[in-house]
Amino acid sequence: MPRLYEYQGKELFKNAGIEIPQGRLVKDEETARKAAQELGLPVYLKIQILGGGRGKRGGVLKAETLEVVQAFSKKLLSHAFDGETASSLLMEREIDYEKEYYMAISADPSLRQPVALFSTKGGMEVENQSPEAFFKYPIPILSGFSEHQAMDLIRMTKGISSSFGHELAKIFVKLYSIYRGVDARLVEINPLVFTKPHFVALDARIEIDDDAIFRHPELHLESAEESGSRASTELEIAAGQIDARDHRGTAHFIQVDPDGTYAKSLGKIAVGFNAVGTGAALTTMDELVPLGYFPSNFCDSSGNPTSAKLYRVTKVILSQPRIEGFIFVSCVSSQQLDNTARGMIKALQELYSHTDGKPNIPMVFAFRGAYDQEALELFKKHGITDSPWVKVLGRDVTEKEAAEAFHQLHQLWEKEKRR
């Protein structure tokens, strides 16, 4: 699900009346130096990436001089964390505080409603805390979350004074208003610290419901489903727009190995991949890996999508760098595979216009299901099957046989390249 950067989350906190540290967003060494002079030393430099655990991995550094500010900002802006290089840092003035708390509003699928979560043990090690350290309060979605309900949750900790409890309850209500306002699945402060006479949110984590992105253009979200803790790639963002205004079927595309480095580390060959049905997709992927291949992407184009969707997603898949082939396998379903074929043929004709749609890398297409014979005939009619690097299969093949057919074709292609 799409996640906001820390600085974006803190802007929402600030607008809701939750106090945050004095800070500046910086993008280079010089602006970092100027910001440090404005804020006053010492400061913390926090890399702005979507992944967690930054503090443990050296993504949050304390600087006590301007020279160190420049050195640290250069280091953080040039270092990749989980393959993601940051374009900005959040610089914040150091805060002395007495106590760390954990506070969150989260969607609970088991209850089918939001829950408020609270702990008196916040900070970097919060994930190592036992479940007993967290107190949960289910929130009725229709009536909302009031201060007295928040107080009921805070009293469960048995150790917080009434005056502290009321201040924490007010923050909880503001947190819930953010949760509802941006259609979030998670709004978290960790840690929330007490520094006389205020509570201050030192960090912000906000995750938005995938299906609500279109309602919040003000958040400037460009994200794809299941991209995890990393930022969405350009191709995932492009693919995410395919379903935006057309809900006839799906073109669900995620890059498993965006730059091909993971496949290389395994000694595998990166290939593009598409399937009709998740079952057929996973089975085919399982058959490809032992043969020496690794899908650079997962793609499920099922639910009877239009040919326009297949055209667009095929171009996205084949735009991936370092792939040495493409394989398409459909499950046996009622999907109109002739429409699927038309979309892929148009994409091939545009991508390989100099050869009338005939690719220069090995490709296998396994059409199994409704209108599969029409799909095969369309590939023949448009001359795609005239290519020595294209093999089109029918409904009588298994996923294993499709993977083996691709392997044989790729071996021939490799021999031809070496000549």
Image: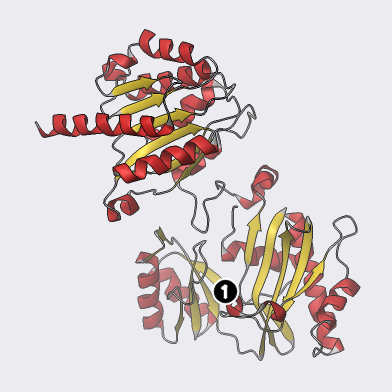
Q: Is residue 320 visible?
A: no
Pick whichever, 176 or 379, lies toward us: 379
Position of residue 108 measured from the top left corner of the image (x, y, whole percent): 73, 60
141 relative position to 175: left or right? right
170 relative position to 332: left or right? right
Q: Count of labels shown?
A: 1
Pick whichever, 198 or 346, lies toward us: 346
Q: Is residue 306 visible?
A: yes
> Relative to 353, does residue 206 appear above or below in the rendering?
below
Position of residue 330 measured from the top left corner of the image (x, y, whole percent): 49, 28
Position of residue 221 measured from the top left corner of the image (x, y, whole percent): 59, 49
Identify the element where label 1 is drawn: strand
105 relative position to 368: left or right? right
Q: Which residue is mark 1?
A: 23
Q: Residues within 10 Å of mark 1 (few under 14, many from 20)?
A: some
For the point 33% across and 11% down, the residue is: 383
> Relative to 401, does residue 56 appear above or below in the rendering?
below
Q: Amino acid at mark 1?
A: Gly
> Relative to 284, does residue 126 appear above or below in the rendering?
below
For the point 38% across and 76% down, the residue is: 72
